[in-house]
Image (cartoon, rainbow, N blue to C red):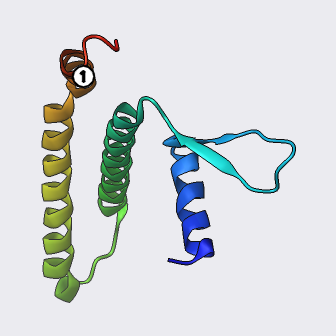
Amino acid sequence: MTKAAISVQVRTLEKHLMCHKIPTSNDRKDYYFISDDISMTSLQANIQKMQRIQHQIEHTLHIFDQLEGIEEEERSSHDACKRRFIEMQAMYEMFLNRLDGLEEEWNRRRAQLFPQIE
């Protein structure tokens, strides 16, 4: 793996708050540490990603509703595409509903795993 590739990945982790840069003044090297709550950060990032996707799907469906003047030969393609977005919207809604409360559940489970640390 190249230094550049590692640097890109570390910056991505830092952007998502999964690691933090340690400030140093006497060294040109950068030092990082992994967040204590990396599991929760990862969980929240994945939920947020799913919410962003769901929002984009809803936005696309709104655009479908605004379309006018669809030619008859394009109607079946339009309707098939719209159905697929409606299915995706329902699927992401189901995913997010099932994930509701997962953060609290993970906090409880994590406390059970390491009771002496919490």
- Height in image: 38 above or below 107? below
- Height in image: 71 above or below 7? below
The foreground one among 97 and 36 is: 36
The foreground one among 108 and 66 is: 108
How far across and how far down the image is residue 7, in percent? 61, 65
Q: Say few, some or many: other residues with alpha carbon within 10 Å of mark 1 (under 14 / 14 to 19 / 20 or more).
A: some
Residue at 37% x, 48% y is: 49
Query: Which quadrant of the figure has residue 112?
Result: top left
How far across and how far down the image is residue 41, in percent? 41, 35
The foreground one among 79 and 13 is: 13
Query: Which quadrant of the figure has residue 56?
Result: bottom left
- The residue where tag 1 is placed is 110
In the rendered image, the residue lying farthest to the front is 26
Q: Which amino acid is tagged 1?
A: Arg
Q: Quadrant of the C terminus?
A: top left
How far across and how far down the image is residue 13, in percent? 51, 51
Query: Which quadrant of the figure has residue 107?
Result: top left
